[in-house]
């Protein structure tokens, strides 16, 4: 049993306190055979021929925000990276860096939320690690997750497959996560609360791939830097991307908060939104499948792939003019994931 | 969004654009948007392209960060290095390079205690938390920002928070307007008057423009319909040759301005000469602390030796600020000078013209 209510340096020193912490917080919540074995490495059945492997670290401040927390985020972020690569996520590992003095109640809440999100996403957290650093050497807690998934035969997604004329689809409103975190951090008193969209997207992706098959050319989760930044990464020698401002779904509260703070929602992070490039013939079916899914009710066609300005992402304004959406030099907001 | 969408209606915008084109009667007119906020609105809504070729929009010196001289910046950077001193600044000033490319961000990475504040009152709170250390507020801004700084100083006086000091780089806009019009190298047909500045000064502050220089001023808000309305009004004045001051921002501005803000300015500041990037030294264009507040004047307390700084080599910010050069015509624009690695201040500030042209580039026809 852990009697102390806060994390001590001793929790990271490998002795009894470490063991208690792992058992009572991590194993208790994330419970599965591989983790319970507490071996040096988890041994798992190979999920398929082609594997997808990814890793991500999470430093969001504050650790708990409307619509989510750092634990939920750490699962969603890695699951979504696997999903948009066309992989079926299977296993996660996680590493925690804890600041001396962290409230144990917060850690429990975060790990519980992590476990719940993992269950929801159908992944197992099979290995983990905990380190404790001196007070002031970290800000509360940081989490790393790595994820392993398998890529079913014949599946291939990527920006090299983009064709002029493909339509760009998003699964709902943009900028919710970044603004929710910003509002929570700055304590800005808006009447309408904004909640993060943080969610595992793997089931939505499967639904889309069933509906569109190989006509779904490329997927990305529009996280750090928002939709505009992700699309800039797609733009290359052959193709550009053209967005239509009037088609972009943005929640009124997010639009108002961005207006108030001088931010552009197209550059604000999402944690439960993806953008898909889909061949025009298949787009209606994919859009219908997205809208029928709980995470795609507000899905919309927001633009298209074009050959007319390769390398550029552009926005058609409601006034008929068209301007470039560049890559920003720095993020608009620090530490949102 | 209520109170905003009304001023963004595309159908009304299209009607206004038509009206502007009809009013121009084939002439090509040169208008200056004085304020950096307007430059950004023009870019964000793509108004420049919609109004071409009848209307050329030139940006003016209305970005307080951009017109801060390299010498003043060098002084701020030197000040930040004074042991124990805390420099409180608005975020925009952090990355502006002084001479030799050094900014407050560099000073901070070398150990200077530079803190970001969102409001002058944050600096007051900081001074209260650190009573044994001098806390210097870097006061940058026009008539819009200066009253808040004045209110903060008066609060520090009444609460006897003696360690709050000010580096006043505040500037007033009418002298800059006059300098541009006297310079004669911009050849303007009208001026889109600053919205927020005019809320403090009143639109009457611009009466000298039609009276002495024979061109119109239309004070504008920052939404597309505000701006198109102001532009239509200026075109009409220019074509009819009846220049005057028109207030097209009635929901924020009146003829006489904000009396409370003006009183605050008078209680703390007196006009002084000031150095503007691009325009040089302009008489009575700065705001120096009055004698009763000399004990808060950081320049008097820390007379650091700073050389007169040259502008960064090749940088044409000065010409951009006077409306002589479009940002895109500067040889450094987008090549050596980008928001990520800025050479001149106009590429740094959120209100800088070069940053606006970079951020909101128009799509060229293929």
Image: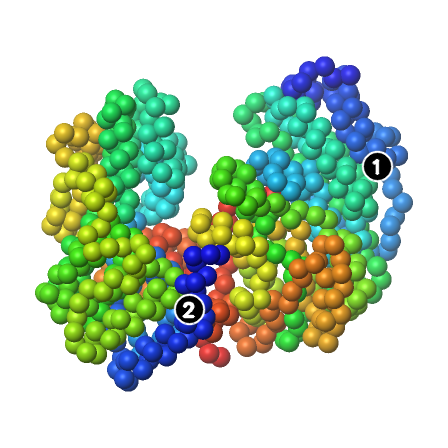
Q: Is residue A247 left or right of residue B259?
A: right
The mark found on residue A42 in the picture is 1
Q: How many marks?
A: 2
Residue placed under numbered mark 2 in the picture: B46
Q: Residue B150, percent across and down?
A: 24, 37
Write the residue at 16% across / 49% down: B285
Q: Nearer the viewer, mark 2 or mark 1?
A: 2
Residue in front for this viewpoint, B263 or B279: B263
Q: Residue A211, percent across and down?
A: 79, 66
| Disc 2 chain ID | B
Residue in front for this viewpoint, B282 or B174: B174
Q: Is residue A10 left or right of residue B352?
A: right
Q: Is residue B276 left or right of residue B116?
A: left
Q: Residue A42, percent across and down?
A: 84, 37
Residue in front for this viewpoint, A42 or A219: A219
Q: Is residue B48 left or right of residue A28?
A: left
Above or below, B132 relative to A273: above
Q: Which quarter of the figure has residue B56?
A: bottom left
Q: Secondary structure at mark 1?
A: loop
How far apart in space, not on screen, are marks 2 and 1 (Cα)?
A: 56 Å
Mark 2: few/some/many CA within 10 Å (<14, 14-19, 20+):
many
Write the residue at 83% across / 29% down: A38
Q: Residue A6, percent across and down?
A: 65, 20
Residue A220 seen: no
Which residue reaches farthest top?
A3
Q: What colour scheme has been applied to the protein in the rendered image?
A: rainbow
Write the residue at 41% across / 71% down: B13
């Amino acid at each position: 049993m852990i009697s102390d209510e806060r994390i001590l340096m001793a929790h990271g020193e490998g002795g009894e306190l470490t063991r208690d912490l792992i058992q009572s917080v991590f194993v208790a919540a994330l419970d599965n055979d591989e983790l319970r074995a507490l071996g040096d490495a988890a041994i798992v059945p190979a999920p398929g021929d082609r594997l997808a492997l990814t890793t991500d670290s999470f430093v969001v401040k504050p650790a708990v925000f409307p619509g989510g927390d750092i634990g939920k985020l750490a699962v969603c972020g890695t699951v979504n990276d696997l999903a948009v690569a066309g992989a079926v996520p299977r296993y996660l590992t996680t590493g925690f860096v804890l600041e001396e003095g962290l409230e144990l109640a917060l850690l429990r809440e975060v790990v519980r939320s992590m476990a719940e999100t993992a269950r929801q996403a159908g992944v197992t957290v099979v290995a983990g690690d905990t380190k404790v650093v001196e007070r002031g050497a970290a800000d509360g807690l940081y989490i790393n997750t790595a994820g392993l998934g398998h890529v079913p035969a014949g599946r291939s997604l990527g920006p090299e497959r983009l064709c002029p004329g493909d339509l760009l689809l998003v699964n709902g409103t943009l900028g919710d996560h970044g603004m929710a975190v910003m509002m929570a951090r700055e304590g800005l008193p808006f009447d309408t609360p904004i909640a993060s969209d943080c969610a595992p997207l793997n089931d939505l992706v499967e639904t889309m791939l069933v509906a569109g098959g190989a006509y779904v050319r490329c997927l990305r989760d529009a996280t750090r830097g928002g939709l505009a930044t992700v699309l800039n990464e797609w733009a290359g020698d052959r193709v550009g991307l053209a967005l239509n401002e009037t088609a972009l779904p943005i929640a009124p509260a997010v639009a108002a908060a961005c207006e108030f703070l001088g931010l552009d929602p197209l550059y604000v992070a999402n944690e439960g939104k993806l953008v898909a490039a889909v061949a025009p013939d298949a787009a209606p079916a994919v859009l219908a499948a997205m809208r029928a899914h709980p995470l795609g009710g507000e899905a919309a066609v927001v633009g298209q792939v074009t050959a007319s300005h390769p390398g550029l992402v552009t926005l058609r304004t409601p006034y008929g003019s068209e301007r470039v959406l560049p890559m920003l030099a720095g993020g608009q907001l620090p530490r949102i994931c | 969004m209520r109170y905003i969408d009304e001023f963004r209606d595309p159908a009304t915008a299209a009607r206004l654009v038509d009206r502007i084109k009809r009013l121009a009667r084939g002439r090509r007119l040169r208008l200056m948007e004085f304020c950096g906020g307007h430059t950004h609105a023009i870019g964000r809504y793509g108004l420049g392209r919609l109004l071409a070729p009848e209307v050329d929009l030139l940006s003016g010196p209305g970005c307080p960060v951009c017109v801060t001289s390299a010498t003043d910046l060098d002084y701020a950077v030197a000040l930040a290095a004074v042991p124990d001193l805390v420099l409180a600044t608005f975020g925009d000033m952090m990355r502006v390079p002084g001479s030799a490319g050094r900014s407050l961000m560099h000073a901070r990475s070398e150990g200077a205690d530079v803190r970001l504040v969102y409001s002058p009152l944050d600096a007051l709170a900081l001074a209260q938390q650190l009573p044994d250390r001098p806390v210097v507020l870097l006061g940058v801004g026009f008539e819009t920002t200066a009253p808040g700084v004045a209110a903060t100083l008066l609060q520090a006086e009444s609460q006897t928070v003696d360690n709050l000091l000010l580096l006043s780089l505040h500037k007033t806009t009418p002298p800059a307007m006059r300098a541009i019009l006297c310079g004669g190298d911009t050849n303007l047909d009208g001026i889109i008057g600053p919205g927020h500045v005019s809320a403090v000064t009143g639109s009457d502050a611009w009466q000298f423009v039609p009276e002495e220089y024979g061109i119109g001023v239309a004070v504008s808000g920052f939404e597309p319909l505000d701006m198109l309305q102001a532009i239509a009004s200026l075109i009409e004045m220019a074509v009819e040759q009846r220049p005057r001051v028109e207030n097209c921002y009635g929901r924020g501005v009146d003829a006489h301005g904000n009396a409370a803000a003006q009183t605050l300015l008078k209680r703390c500041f007196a006009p002084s000469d000031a150095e503007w990037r691009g325009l040089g030294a302009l008489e009575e264009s700065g705001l120096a602390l009055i004698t009763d507040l000399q004990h808060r004047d950081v320049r008097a307390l820390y007379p650091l030796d700073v050389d007169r700084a040259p502008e960064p080599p090749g940088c044409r910010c000065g010409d951009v600020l006077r409306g002589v050069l479009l940002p895109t015509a500067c040889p450094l624009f987008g090549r050596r000078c980008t928001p990520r690695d800025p050479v001149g201040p106009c590429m740094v500030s959120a209100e800088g013209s070069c940053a606006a042209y970079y951020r909101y580039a128009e799509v060229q026809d293929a």
